Image (cartoon, rainbow, N blue to C red):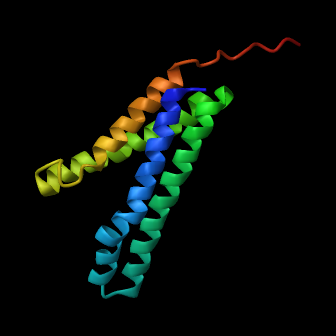
């Protein structure tokens, strides 16, 4: 078992919970209230819940990678790529539109989770064994 990936998976689950239970009232509900269009409200909810699903799936992928060395690198690699992309988006939009990184600090959580996962993907990685014919 990779404790680094386990830590990344647990932190990802915590992040998912924060997104759902703190972000819902603070972000999702106000966005719905601010849009007069049912179509835009639908898209806001779809995007919100798609993000929730992706966070949960990534959390599960990290936890599976933590316990199953056969899929450790590909699962962790996919999540690392996504989480670094999310971090870059938060940094880019935070600086471009808000002039600060601290109004949207989610980038820090994504960087930490990606870092933990990267360490875990390398530690204890099993080499691919050659199959003899």
Rendered-image quadrant of the C terminus: top right
Residue 94, given in percent of the width and then of the height, sits at: 19, 52
* Residue at the right extreme, as displayed: 133
Return the x and y of residue 28 as percentages of the image width and height.
Answer: 35, 71
Vertical relation: 36 (above or below) 17: below
Q: Nearer the viewer, residue 5 or 80?
A: 5
Q: Residue at x 26, y 81 (%)?
A: 34
For the image shown, how many numbered marks are present on the structure?
0
Is 31 situated left or right of 56 in this image? left
Rendered view: 9 above or below 67: below
Q: Which residue is at the front of the view, 85 or 106?
A: 106
Q: Residue at x 45, y 46 (%)?
A: 12
Where residue 107 appears, as percent x and y from the top left, is 29, 45
Is 108 placed left or right of 19 in the picture? Answer: left
Which residue is found at the position 35% from the left and 63% from the top? 22
Rendered location of residue 53, percent (x, y): 52, 59
For the N terminus, the image quarter is top right
Classify 128 as above or below 115.
above
> Which quadrant would residue 113 be assigned to in this image?
top left
> In screen coordinates, is 93 left or right of 54?
left
């Amino acid at each position: 078992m990779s404790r680094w990936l386990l830590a990344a998976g647990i932190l990802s689950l915590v992040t998912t919970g924060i997104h759902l239970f703190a972000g819902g009232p603070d972000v999702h509900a106000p966005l719905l209230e601010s849009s007069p269009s049912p179509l835009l409200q639908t898209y806001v909810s779809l995007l919100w819940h798609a993000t929730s699903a992706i966070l949960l799936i990534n959390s599960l992928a990290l936890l599976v990678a933590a316990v199953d060395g056969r899929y450790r690198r590909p699962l962790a690699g996919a999540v690392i790529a996504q989480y670094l992309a999310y971090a870059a988006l938060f940094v880019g939009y935070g600086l471009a539109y808000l002039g600060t990184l601290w109004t949207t600090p989610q980038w820090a959580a994504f960087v930490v989770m990606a870092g933990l996962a990267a360490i875990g993907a390398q530690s204890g990685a099993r080499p691919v064994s050659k199959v003899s014919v």
